Image (spheres, helix red, strand yellow):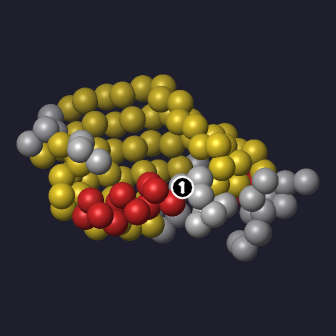
């Protein structure tokens, strides 16, 4: 969390998540891979990083298990920098690919 400003704004339009401030963002990250979420074994594979002015674009793959279903999907993360720290983060995921891989029906996964 040292890399984020105290007032960081995190958005994930794909999954409808918003976290305002470092405290909310910390709670969001802490919940991944716990009983609070259905995600396990999360891995991030960074493929490209592009810097321009106060913006950073990161492209890669996100993988793991969701409700006992394996998934591997592409993502893009946009960082908005201020004074050398991340002041904003927007995450975008290939949601249709995720839905297909885990058999998502809107409430549960059915990958079997």
Query: In screen coordinates, is 37 left or right of 4?
Result: right
Question: Residue 19 lies in what quarter of the image?
Answer: bottom left
Along the viewing direction, whichever of 101 and 67 lies nearer the viewer: 67
Q: Position of residue 85 (x, y in %)?
A: 18, 43
Which image quarter is the C terminus in?
bottom right
Q: Position of residue 24 (x, y in %)?
A: 34, 66
Label 1, on which residue?
A: 32
Q: Residue furthest bottom?
A: 107
Q: Label 1: few (<14), some or many (≥20) within 10 Å?
A: some
Q: Position of residue 28 (x, y in %)?
A: 43, 61
Query: Residue visible at 33% across and 45% down?
Result: 78
Q: Which secondary structure, mark 1?
A: loop
Q: Position of residue 88 (x, y in %)?
A: 25, 53
Query: Residue visible at 28% across and 36% down?
Result: 56
When the figure is inspected, residue 20 is found, relative to residue 61, above or below; the finding is: below
Query: In screen coordinates, is 64 left or right of 55?
Result: right
Question: Residue 108 lies in what quarter of the image?
Answer: bottom right
Can residue 55 be seen here? yes
Along the viewing direction, whichever of 21 and 16 lies nearer the viewer: 21
Query: Residue visible at 63% across and 63% down?
Result: 35
Along the viewing direction, whichever of 34 and 62 lies nearer the viewer: 34
């Amino acid at each position: 969390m040292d890399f984020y400003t105290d007032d960081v704004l995190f958005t994930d339009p794909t999954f409808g998540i918003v976290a305002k401030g470092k405290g909310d963002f910390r709670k969001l990250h802490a919940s991944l891979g716990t009983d609070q979420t259905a995600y396990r074994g999360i891995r991030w594979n960074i493929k490209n990083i592009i810097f321009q002015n106060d913006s950073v674009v990161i492209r890669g793959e996100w993988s793991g298990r969701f409700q006992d279903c394996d998934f591997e999907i592409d993502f893009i993360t946009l960082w908005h920098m201020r004074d050398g720290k991340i002041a904003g983060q927007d995450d975008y995921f290939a949601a249709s690919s995720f839905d297909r891989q885990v058999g998502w029906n809107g409430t549960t996964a059915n990958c079997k």
